[in-house]
């Protein structure tokens, strides 16, 4: 599920700041290369694993440099599929709605 109107899409900051803020809010930087990174927050509800994922793309420089400029995309929410994969067609369980909203707002506030 793409979380449109989150206020994160289009935010541009230096990679060092983004990495510090996002990781400080409990996200892990997983898939990344020189131009793109994905930050995941693992959430669980009744034994099911979900991820709140925030993509970042380098628009100036490369990610190995903390001075590279990155632009965030719309966050997405998905359910983990065994053995690997994510189903992005799910809705956010009611028990996780508050957490997801708070994390997105905290990111937006810290990076704006």
Image: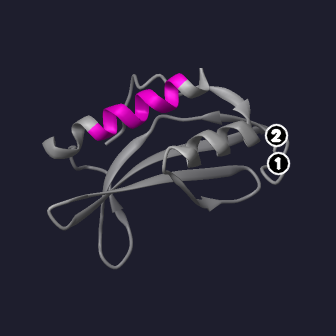
Answer with the quarter of the image where residue 111 lies.
top right
Q: Which mark is residue 68?
A: 2
Using the image as rendered, state which of residue 87 and residue 25 is in the foreground: 25
85 left or right, relative to 65: left
Which residue is under mark 1? 62
Residue positioned most to the bottom: 83
51 left or right, relative to 16: left
Residue 57 locus on image (x, y percent):
67, 42
Distance from the alpha carbon under mark 2 to that under mark 1: 6 Å
x 56%, y 52%: residue: 38
Label 2: state its secondary structure.
Answer: loop
* Residue 93 visible from this viewpoint: no
Residue 4 locus on image (x, y percent):
38, 28
Q: How is the image coloured?
A: one colour
The answer to whether residue 6 is above or below residue 75 is above
107 falls in the magenta region: yes
- The residue stretch that appears in magenta: 99-109
* Residues tagged 2 and 1 counted as in contact (Cβ below 8 A): yes
Q: Which mark is residue 88?
A: none
28 left or right, relative to 12: left
x 85%, y 42%: residue: 61
In the rendered view of the protein, which quadrant contains the N terminus? Answer: top left
């Amino acid at each position: 599920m793409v979380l449109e109107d989150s206020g994160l899409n289009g935010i541009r900051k230096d990679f060092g700041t983004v990495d510090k803020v996002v990781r400080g809010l409990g996200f892990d930087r997983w898939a990344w290369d020189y131009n793109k990174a994905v930050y995941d927050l693992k959430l669980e509800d009744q034994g099911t694993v979900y991820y709140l994922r925030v993509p970042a793309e380098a628009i100036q420089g490369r990610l190995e440099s903390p001075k590279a400029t990155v632009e965030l995309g719309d966050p997405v929410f998905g359910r983990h599929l065994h053995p690997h994969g994510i189903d992005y067609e799910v809705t956010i369980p009611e028990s996780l709605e508050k957490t997801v909203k708070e994390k997105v707002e905290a990111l937006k506030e810290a990076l704006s």
